[in-house]
Image (cartoon, rainbow, N blue to C red):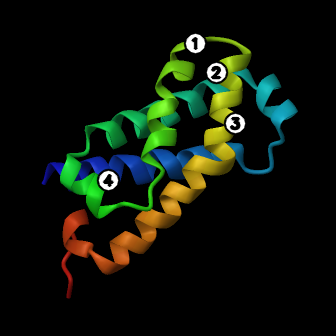
Amino acid sequence: MIVGALLANIVEAGSGVLTLAEGMDFATFQRSRLARAEIGRLVEVMATSLADLPDASRHRFAEIDWSAWAALADPLCEAGPTRDEALWFAVKSLVPATLMWLRVYRESQPEVFGLDAG
């Protein structure tokens, strides 16, 4: 099931983002080239996978901030402070909220995630 695979990618990438950013403040994030690059890659995986979800899934997961994820597309293509600020917003706001909602949806709709309801 393609939706289940996309959702697994989103959760895996999001978990990686939160692990890498744990304990960081914005200044530390900006100084850490390796962590910043990997966080950027993982946020891009999340954004792309979310964008690839079919419209039916978007309606099913109405609590996810689809417009905020779509708005990240342009800043993620840039370099420098604009990208850093967009990534930091994703780290502190979008990623945790998205993972939280996906956890809620996974409990109530396990079949969408390719899981047995039993």
Circles 1 and 2 in contact, beta carbons < 8 Å: yes
Residue at the image point whose x is 64% and y is 43% from the top: 91
Secondary element at image label 3: helix
Quarter of the image with the N terminus is: bottom left
> Between disc 1 and disc 2, whose residue precedes?
1
Q: Relative to residue 27, is residue 95 depicted above or below?
A: below
Please name the amino acid that badge 4 sits on. Leu
Question: Where does residue 85 sit, x and y in percent of width and height?
Answer: 71, 28
> Between disc 1 and disc 3, whose residue precedes?
1
Please name the amino acid that badge 3 sits on. Trp
> Between disc 4 and disc 1, whose residue precedes?
4
Q: Which residue is mark 4?
A: 7
Disc 2 to disc 4, how far (Cα)?
Answer: 24 Å
Q: Residue furthest right?
A: 27
> Between disc 3 and disc 4, whose residue precedes?
4
Circles 3 and 4 in contact, beta carbons < 8 Å: no
Q: Which residue is mark 1?
A: 78
Q: Which residue is mark 3?
A: 88
Residue 35 visible from this viewpoint: no
Q: Single out the mark in the foreground, 4 or 1.
A: 1
